[in-house]
Amino acid sequence: MRAVIQRVTEANCKVDGKITGAITDGFLVLLGIEDADTHEDLDWLAQKIVNMRVFGDENGLMNKGLADIDGNILLISQFTLFASTKKGNRPGFTRAARPDKAIPLYESMIKQLSSLLNKEVQTGIFGADMKISLVNDGPVTISIDTKNKE
């Protein structure tokens, strides 16, 4: 799995002009799932996301996590995180998991993050043409790959 985590003051997802998920203060998480991903990858990544300390403390240092600020998550499926750009100018997406594998893992990630946060995780709609708006705070943007554990 790959995730791009953006610290935001606000973010939302619209599909056909209607908001499917919206948050203030927290993380916009773009999640890519590949065929090789397992529930172990999911569990490891969920823990990393929820426990990541990138929110400012009283001294302005990045020492606080989501729980410390009562933060939120907007989770968006993003198969393009597995784009291959090695050949030519048109990216290939063969590493991205097909919906029959990706959807159950995406739904499990929603449940896992909600459980760890003790609150509902906001989402987009898997496979939809989504319009994402955000105010990146900092900016702070972190990418994580579960296969490299970084």
Image: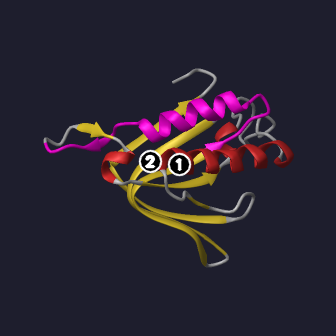
Query: Up-down: is 112 above or below 86?
Result: below
User: Disc 2 on helix, strand or loop?
Assistant: strand
Q: Residue under circle 2?
A: 6
The residue positioned farthest toward the top in the image shown: 148
User: Residue farthest to the left?
Assistant: 59
**Magenta span covers which residues?**
31-58
Residue 6 shown left or right of residue 46 in the figure: left
* Residue 25 spot, x, y in % from top left: 36, 58
Q: Tell me which residue sits at (64%, 64%) in the image.
A: 130
The relative height of residue 50 versus residue 110 in the rendered view (above or below) is above
Q: How is the image coloured?
A: secondary structure
Residue on which disc 1 sits: 29
Q: Is residue 12 above or below residue 67?
A: below
Q: Could you say which quadrant of the image residue 13 lies in?
A: bottom right
Q: Residue lying farthest bottom?
A: 17
Where disc 1 sits, the SS reads: strand
Mark 2, residues whose alpha carbon is within 10 Å: few (<14), some, or many (≥20)?
A: many
